[in-house]
Amino acid sequence: MEPIGLLRTMKLKIKCNGSPQSAVVVDAATDRVVENVLGVEISLNPFNVEAAIVIKDIELDLEGIEAEVIDDIDTSWDDGGTGTPDD
């Protein structure tokens, strides 16, 4: 199977009939299902909609990408059995 989105911009669409088990992510131009999607999180407010899509085993050719650091903290835990993070 030819990889989806090879050498072109891909817009994604989330399709769901109301049941999480039926939700799929598809290529908006071809309606082909994007495989290996582990999860989708959607954030809505009156002025904006944002979605985060987690995909495993993905190959990307990225150009002109802008990124934003969401959380820049030390997330390592070694609590020695106390249940609290080390400081």
Image: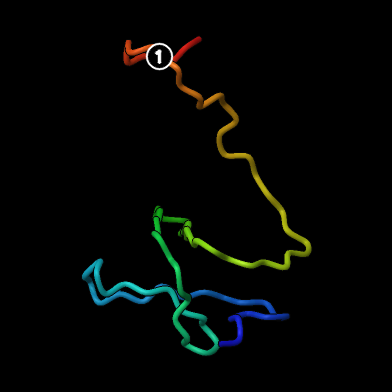
Q: Residue 56: percent from the left, percent from the top? A: 50, 61
Residue at the disc numbered 1: 79
Give me the residue at 39% from left, 11% from top.
80
- Residue lying at the far left of the rendered structure: 19
Q: Nearer the viewer, residue 56 or 12?
A: 56
Helix, strand or loop at label 1? It is loop
Q: Mark 1 is on which residue type?
A: Asp
Splitting the image into 4 quarters, where does residue 72 fall? Answer: top right
- The quadrant the N terminus occupies is bottom right
Which residue is rendered at x = 51% and y = 81% of the image?
Answer: 27
Disc 1 crowd, CA 10 A, few/some/many (<14, 14-19, 20+): few
**Where's residue 69, x and y in %?**
63, 39
| 21 left or right of 6 in image | left
Residue 32 is situated, as x and y percent measured from the top left of the image, at: 47, 86
Q: Nearer the viewer, residue 76 or 52?
A: 76
Residue depicted at x 47% and y 60%: 53
Q: Is residue 63 above or below residue 41?
A: below
